[in-house]
Image (cartoon, rainbow, N blue to C red):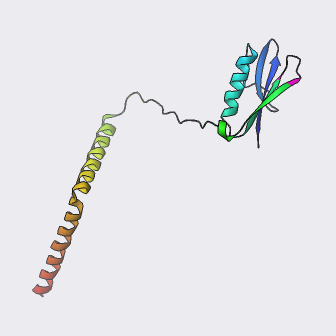
Amino acid sequence: MRTIYHVLPYHDRWAVKINKAKRASSVHKKRDSALRAASDLAKSHPRSQVVIHKATGEIAGDRTYEYRHYQQKKKVRAVVGKIKKTKIKNLQKEYRRRSLRRKAAQLGLARKRREHYRRSRTAKVAALKRGR
């Protein structure tokens, strides 16, 4: 389904309206700025169309925007003023743990640790069996 925007004369100004909307999305002094705003809105949808009207209200032309024009909305991160010190400390600890794990993986220490644990475990089990 296609989203349709209209650039219409509105009193002494130009309005951008979505198809069958009661209120205008935006109102501009000049037709060019209204067209620019309508095209920006249209590019925020995968399939959309901008219908351009004359000052008399007649349709002057239209522009269609397809997937190649589609600009996905970027997620905007909210800037947090102050983060509690405990959160920062927990993050630092987690980063330290991760870096240690990475270093151990690079050196192959994790594998050595597992082998050592397996050997000591089997040695304990063997000692228990001998003690019976």
Q: Is residue 5 left or right of residue 101?
A: right
Q: How many marks?
A: 0
- Residue 3 sits above or below residue 112 on the image: above
Q: Quadrant of the N terminus?
A: top right
Give residue 110's position: percent from left, percent from top. 23, 61
Q: What segment is highlighted magenta in the picture? A: 53-59
Give the quadrant of residue 63.
Answer: top right
Tell me the residue at 80%/11% (across/down).
12
Residue 1 in sight here: yes
- Residue 104 sits above or below residue 71 on the image: below
Tell me the residue at 28%/39% (across/down).
89
Tell me the residue at 73%/22% (across/down).
35
Q: Is residue 83 left or right of residue 118?
A: right
Give residue 5's position: percent from left, percent from top. 77, 30
- Magenta stretch prevailing secondary structure: loop
Q: Extreme left residue here? A: 131
Q: Quadrant of the C terminus?
A: bottom left
Give residue 59's position: percent from left, percent from top. 87, 25
23 falls in the magenta region:
no
- Residue 24 sits above or below residue 119 on the image: above
Q: Is residue 66 left or right of residue 114?
A: right
> Quick one: 93 or 86, which is closer to the camera?
93
Tell me the residue at 48%/33% (across/down).
77
Give the quadrant of residue 95.
Answer: top left
- Residue 132 sits above or below residue 34 on the image: below
Give the quadrant of residue 32.
Answer: top right
